Image (tube, helix red, strand yellow):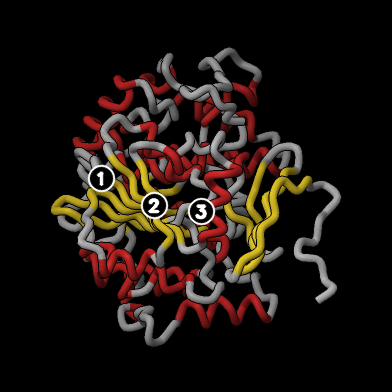
Amino acid sequence: MNLPVYYQAKQYKVIDLQVAREGSLAVVEDGRSRVMIFDNQYTLGGTWVTPNLRRQAHLPLLLHEKPAKVGFIGLGTGITASGALEHQAVEFITAVELSALVAESAARNFDQFNHGVCHHPKAKVLVEDARIYLEASKESFDVIIGDLFTPWRPGEASLSSLEQFHAARQALRGAGVFCQWIELTQWTPEQFQIAAATFRKVFGHLYLFRAGFGTGSVPVGLVGFKSGSPDWSTVARRTDFERQAGRLVDPLCRHPEGVAMLYLGEFVPPSEYERQINTLNNLRLELSASRQVVLLDDGNHYSGARDPWLRLLDKQSAALAHQADLPAALRPYPRLGALATQFELAMEANDPGAQGIAQRLIDQIAPGIRTDAGANWALWPGSMTPWEFLHLPGPAISTQSPTGESDR
């Protein structure tokens, strides 16, 4: 009873601290970022990764011809959901958040970072269990986006269960798009294969996107369609529409070539995983992931600097260069995205070869992206643009978003 509610570290300034039946929630700042810390152990979002979080909304929204009605599974800081407000095509947003503490804190402490999404006339926030809400509600959506979750926390792995994917697919309109984001560095290859097999059992196909080129964090989107597959003519029309509207300023998300740089293609797990489906009855993923946490065993996880992720990235991007998944004009760009990750790794290692990789990136980035005066290059999905690294004149680097907030 005498233990403090929040173990305050010296580098953190506590902005807000609330305690309720679901636990404690501290909102803290460390000089560069404001974050939520749940029960002293789990960080929800962070303002310093705002571009990547909003990109988790941008990418699935660009896959739908007219994403008028959008649902979010999880709110967190509200920054991911706020990305939908940068799309002219979006008419209404429904965000379903399990924790009342989190929903209230997003509105009270992150309003200036999330476009005021909690109070926005085009949005509503519901405090509900999203899985049960999708099953029970008569609402339907053009796009549903699942926020990042940790597979070992009690109940969270249900977000990658057969029942959850069925509920999400049922809640989609005819041409609907579903995207569940996972932080791949928290998953083993075996756990990912189980989730992939479970997803494919419901949607038939699984397509992968990633939110950025960085290696410390690897958010990967599992994308399925109620019917059909990625239509790159739709992506071209959507990027053109949002580019003309002027709200969406992420440099890659304004062009189909940029979206293709973040595309990893269709993923098919080995056949032996077809019978290892994650359901609410067996909790395969929760038991496996929590066992590893208890045993302090993270050596088998994916990581941007470890072989499993790099092998997956290379395999997927190489396959796309020879398949019809992409129009011929876009096929070089997944490989270019893989090169951008090599650039990140080379910078981290202080590798002299980073200079050559940076120049190759500059030479191969689509001309339309390079000359896009409306793009905010501070939102580049890596730690530094190749122009900055080489100290070369390049695209103008703006530090302001359309709403006047700082994005860095």
Location of residue 68 (image quadrant): top left
Residue 51: percent from left, percent from top: 52, 37
N-terminal of the two: label 3 or label 2? Answer: 2
Q: What's the residue at 30%, 60% (across, down)?
A: 206
Disc 2: which residue? 95
Q: Is residue 223 above or below residue 121?
A: below
**Could you tell me which quadrant the C terminus lies in?**
top right
Q: Nearer the viewer, residue 72 or 352?
A: 72
- Specify few, some or many for label 2: CA neighbours under 10 Å numbering under 14, 14-19, or 20 or more: many
Residue 366 at least partly seen = yes
- The amino acid type found where label 1 is placed reads Lys
State the CA–CA distance, disc 1 to disc 2: 11 Å
Q: How many marks?
A: 3
State whether residue 316 appears in this view: no
- Amino acid identity at mark 2: Ala
Answer with left or right where residue 58 lies relative to residue 363. left
Q: Judging from the image, what secondary structure is the residue with disc 3 in?
A: helix
Tag 3 near tag 2, CB within 8 Å? no
Q: Which residue is mark 3?
A: 103
Q: Label 2, secondary structure: give it.
A: strand
Badge 1 is on which residue?
Answer: 69
Q: Is residue 96 left or right of residue 156?
A: left
Query: In the image, which disc is placed on residue 162?
Result: none
Q: Earlier in the sequence, mark 1 or mark 3?
A: 1
For the residue pair 194 and 324, the one nearer the viewer reads as: 194
